[in-house]
Image (spheres, rainbow, N blue to C red):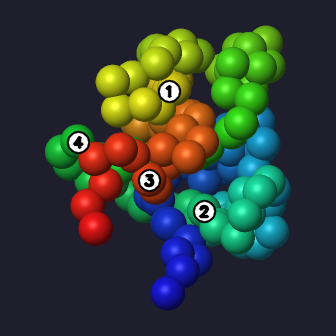
Amino acid sequence: MDLNQVTIPSLNVVKATEFYKTLGLHLIVDALPRYVRFECPNGNSTLSIHKVNELPKGSGITIYFEDKHLDELVKNLQQKGIEFTETPEDKTWLWREAHLYDLDGNKIILYHAGKHRKNPPWRIG
């Protein structure tokens, strides 16, 4: 089994589309203003956004995107006007992470974990 896509809700898919294009995702399905689908620059995963009239309540969704050149990516995104709530920082779980929110309040974590992505020292059998 492999993860195909994650779909997130948005109040304004047009604005969300521009945001995710700025992050570097490639638009592959354009059914604006109700739906779009992106592919990630690396790997096989995709991200879809669909129009909703109301966002879900609670802590919402967290999306993780990995990039080998995290610090450079964050710097480039900041130059494009993307605001971060946390700039790249080494975490105790051996990932380097930067945090931000999209226009609908979905949390995004840009990170680099290398070999620890799926194989941390505490991984179980």
**Mark 1 element type:** strand
Mark 4 and 1 residues: CB-CB less than 8 Å, in contact? no
Q: Which residue in the protein does label 3 denote? A: 119
**Mark 3 element type:** loop
Residue 92's spot in the image, x, y percent?
33, 24
Q: Earlier in the sequence, mark 1 or mark 2?
A: 2
Other residues around mark 1 within 10 Å, as few (<14) / some (14–19) / many (≥20)? many
Other residues around mark 2 within 10 Å, as few (<14) / some (14–19) / many (≥20)? many
Q: Amino acid at mark 4?
A: Ser
Q: Quadrant of the C terminus?
A: bottom left
Q: Which residue in the protein does label 4 denote? A: 59
Task: For marks 3 and 4, give the CA distance.
Answer: 27 Å
Q: Amino acid at mark 1?
A: Glu
Q: Amino acid at mark 2?
A: Leu
Q: Which residue in the protein does label 2 denote? A: 47
Q: Earlier in the sequence, mark 4 or mark 2?
A: 2
Mark 3 and 4 residues: CB-CB less than 8 Å, in contact? no
